[in-house]
Amino acid sequence: MIETIAGISVPDTDLIREATALVRSAADDTLFHHSRRVYVWGMLQAKASSLEPDPELAYVGAMFHDLGLTQKYRTRDRRFEVDGAEAAYDFLREQGRSEEEARAVWLGIALHTTPEIPLSLAPEVAVVTLGVETDVLGLRLDHISEENRREVVRQHPRKQFKQRILEAFHEGMKDRPETTFGTMNDDVLSHFDPSFKRENFVRIIMDNDWNE
């Protein structure tokens, strides 16, 4: 039976069931419900923007986008976005999806904390950022009806979400602070750790080994 949330269908396929089980086993309630909301918000926002992403690819992009924050999938030497992107790519290839399809989802996850650029790429890339920006930043909420907002949050609650997602970001990145350079993620580390020192782009340019 096809599940529908706020008019958005979750495909009833083996790929979707396996993706859901994988993320459910690795993520806590905060990240799991966030990821499910990201799928629905992303598809609603895509519809409002006349985009038509592949639903299975959009679902994997949404469900895997924060997997790199989890204990099971995070590394110590690369951005959490890349950890999730790699997991999604491998999963999709194992499921028989093409290299091109898997790479689009990789990009959607890897770029989901990079403003603007994903929205100029393929729908399967843009849909992840559209969903994340709606759920985390509250962008474009006026594109989604109050009724649809209530239904999504009823099925996937936002219990203390703002604080809990910030805590999840911090937990997933605090052991690899150097990976936050050039991203908004260093704002999170600075918020939780007053001793955290950001890299400075200007200083890197001025202090490198070139004479001029």
Image (cartoon, grey):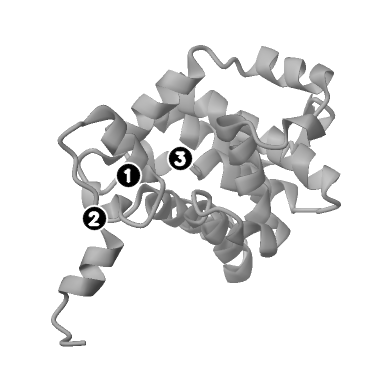
At label 1, the amino acid type is Asp
Residue located at (40% from left, 55% from top): 82
Image position of 177 (left or right of 34): left
The image position of residue 36, as x and y in percent, is 61, 30
Residue located at (83% from left, 17% from top): 147
Q: Which residue is mark 2?
A: 199
Q: From the viewer's side, name the closer residue of 60 and 156.
A: 156
Q: Which residue is mark 3?
A: 66
The image position of residue 81, as x and y in percent, is 42, 50
Say whether marks 3 and 2 touch (CB < 8 Å): no
Mark 3 packing: few (<14 Cα in 10 Å), some, or many (20+)? many
- State which tag comes first along the sequence, 3 or 1: 3
Examine the image and state in which quarter residue 124 appears. bottom right
Say whether marks 1 and 2 touch (CB < 8 Å): yes
Mark 1 packing: few (<14 Cα in 10 Å), some, or many (20+)? many
Give the CA separation, mark 3 to mark 2. Answer: 24 Å
- State which tag comes first along the sequence, 3 or 2: 3
Compared with 51, 170 (above or below) is above
At label 3, the amino acid type is Asp
The image position of residue 42, as x and y in percent, is 70, 41
Q: Which residue is mark 1?
A: 186
Q: From the viewer's side, name the closer residue of 77 and 191.
A: 191
Examine the image and state in which quarter residue 135 appears. top right
Image position of 103 (left or right of 90): right
Q: For marks 3 and 1, give the one nearer the viewer.
A: 1
Image position of 4 (left or right of 114): right
Give the CA separation, mark 1 to mark 2. Answer: 9 Å
